[in-house]
Image (cartoon, rainbow, N blue to C red):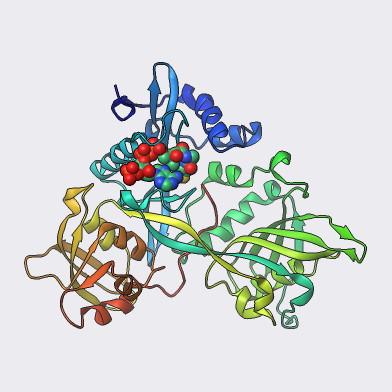
């Protein structure tokens, strides 16, 4: 029996510890007991696929049931995770078999028109139709070189707290902000507990995570999550502030929180891994170059059900276009689809006439959150204009007024 013909089974709740040990070894970090317990609450055994060779676990892939923000709303999206294949069984088709099975299940369940994931390596998932839908900025700033505009009288007081003690306030701000953010995932209580878990072993010598909250006229309207690490040399302090999230419902709150984060005494450096590509901080500081922002891939989207997915998001401008889609993995998606839509509604139906544009399903994933331009894909030779003029007419509809972004690796 070749590896690829080993049977794929559905996990049971009691497999969770074994999966944790298996993936802990594959990702070379072992199992942290605190994270492992927090993750148990979000683990969905009936969505986890396992492969065993005799009794030994040799492959896994799972999904979480969550909502994802998309242009103009939110929709159920399979959050794919816990993917791994044992070094003894790699490159024999086990991942391929699990991805095929998982996508087929998601498609046939008809609940989630898209799947979404963070990739450990960018070359793994395109072959399964995943497209890079959201990028992020990794900021490594020199805080002593950065200035913000002077405070305005409407900046309210700030308060520090242990994140676990203010989870309800964080959640309220997050939910109000999320409504406008393509790429952000819904967080219920279990997810908040998981996001906020803060094992000492993973702090790299830094402090525990802290929250800073901004009090606006109607209560808390912004928060930051951060930690600090002491560093010194002969010239004095050069501590590091590591920011996990800054979420605010108003520019005033956002600016006040950053004012504190950029001026923490004894720190000189800032590290922020998941800023949006249109992050306001870059437009606020007096020397954006000193933020040393690097663009890195974030969310990958797989359009699983083409008509349902394309009809579920909104479009920045009116669009009426026929797209010829190819999808070797889910042939139901292959064909010509007429997409009609605009800022408040959209529909996608089988088309009988000639197509205006042609692309594979991976391109649709890249376009889905508005983070990639139609023209860029055409210039890359991956999307084709079949009717002259179709590209420039359709292109303005796909981006959204906020760039796709992603706050949390799941
Ligand atoms: C959403 C997440 O959880 S992301 C985390 C993914 N997991 C990891 O990175 C953990 C460490 N890596 C692994 O466990 C494995 O190497 C996996 C899961 C990435 C790949 O599993 P495999 O069973 O070896 O993949 P499989 O045999 O199906 O490979 C299919 C194809 O993808 C290619 N491929 C798979 N992984 C990689 C990779 N990391 N880099 C380059 N190519 C790859 C294979 O070469 C193969 O190509 P081919 O068909 O042209 O020969």
Residue 76: give x, y in percent of width and height. 36, 51
The quadrant where ligand 1 appears is top left
Q: Is residue 223 above or below residue 332?
A: below
x and y, in percent, of residue 177 in the image: 53, 64
Considering depth in this image, is 335 or 398 the residue closer to the camera?
Answer: 335
Q: For the image shown, how many numbered marks are present on the structure?
A: 0
Location of residue 68 (image quadrant): bottom left
Residue situated furthest top in the rendering: 54
Asked whether residue 79 appears in the rendered view, the answer is no
Q: For the point 75% across and 83% down, which residue is it?
A: 150
Q: Evaluate whether residue 295 shows in this view.
A: yes
Residue 210 position in % (x across, y down): 73, 53
Q: Is residue 189 left or right of residue 63?
A: right
Is 138 situated above or below 207? below
Q: Quadrant of the N terminus?
A: top left
Identified at 26% across, 57% down, the residue is 361
Please identify the residue farthest to the left as the structure is shown.
Answer: 352
Percent of width and height locating residue 19:
50, 28
Q: Is residue 231 left or right of residue 209?
A: right
| Residue positioned 20% across, 60% down in the render | 325
């Amino acid at each position: 029996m070749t590896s690829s013909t080993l049977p794929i089974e559905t996990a049971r709740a009691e497999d969770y510890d074994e999966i944790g040990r298996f993936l802990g070894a594959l990702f070379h970090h072992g199992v942290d007991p605190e994270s492992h317990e927090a993750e148990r609450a979000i683990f969905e055994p009936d969505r986890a696929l396992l492969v065993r060779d005799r009794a030994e676990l040799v492959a896994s892939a799972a999904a979480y049931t969550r909502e994802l923000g998309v242009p103009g709303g939110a929709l159920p999206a399979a959050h794919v995770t816990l993917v791994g294949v044992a070094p003894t069984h790699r490159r024999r088709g086990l991942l391929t078999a699990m991805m095929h099975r998982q996508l087929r299940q998601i498609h046939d369940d008809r609940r989630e028109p898209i799947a979404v994931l963070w990739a450990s390596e960018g070359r793994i998932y395109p072959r399964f139709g995943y497209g890079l839908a959201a990028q992020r900025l990794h900021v490594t700033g020199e805080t002593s070189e950065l200035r913000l505009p002077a405070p305005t009288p409407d900046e309210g007081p700030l308060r520090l707290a242990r994140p676990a003690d203010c989870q309800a306030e964080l959640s309220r701000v997050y939910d109000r902000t999320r409504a406008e953010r393509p790429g952000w995932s819904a967080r219920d209580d279990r997810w908040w507990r998981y996001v906020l878990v803060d094992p000492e072993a993973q702090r790299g010598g830094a402090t525990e995570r802290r929250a800073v909250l901004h009090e606006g006229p109607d209560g808390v309207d912004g928060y930051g999550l951060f930690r600090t690490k002491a560093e010194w040399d002969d010239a004095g302090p050069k501590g590091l502030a590591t920011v996990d999230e800054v979420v605010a419902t108003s520019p005033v709150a956002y600016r006040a929180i950053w004012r504190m984060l950029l001026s923490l005494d004894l720190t000189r450096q800032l590290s922020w891994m998941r800023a949006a590509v249109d992050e306001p901080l870059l437009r606020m500081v007096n020397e954006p170059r000193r933020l040393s922002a690097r663009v890195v891939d974030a969310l990958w989207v797989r359009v699983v059900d083409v008509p349902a997915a394309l009809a579920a998001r909104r479009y920045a401008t009116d669009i009426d276009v026929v797209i010829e889609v190819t999808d070797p993995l889910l042939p139901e998606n292959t064909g010509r689809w007429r997409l009609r839509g605009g800022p408040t509604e959209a529909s996608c139906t089988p088309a009988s006439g000639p197509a205006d544009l042609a692309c594979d399903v991976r391109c649709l994933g890249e376009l889905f959150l508005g983070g990639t331009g139609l023209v860029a894909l055409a210039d890359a030779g991956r999307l084709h204009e079949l009717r002259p003029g179709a590209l420039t007419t359709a292109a303005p509809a796909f981006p959204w007024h906020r760039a796709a972004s992603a706050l949390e690796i799941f």
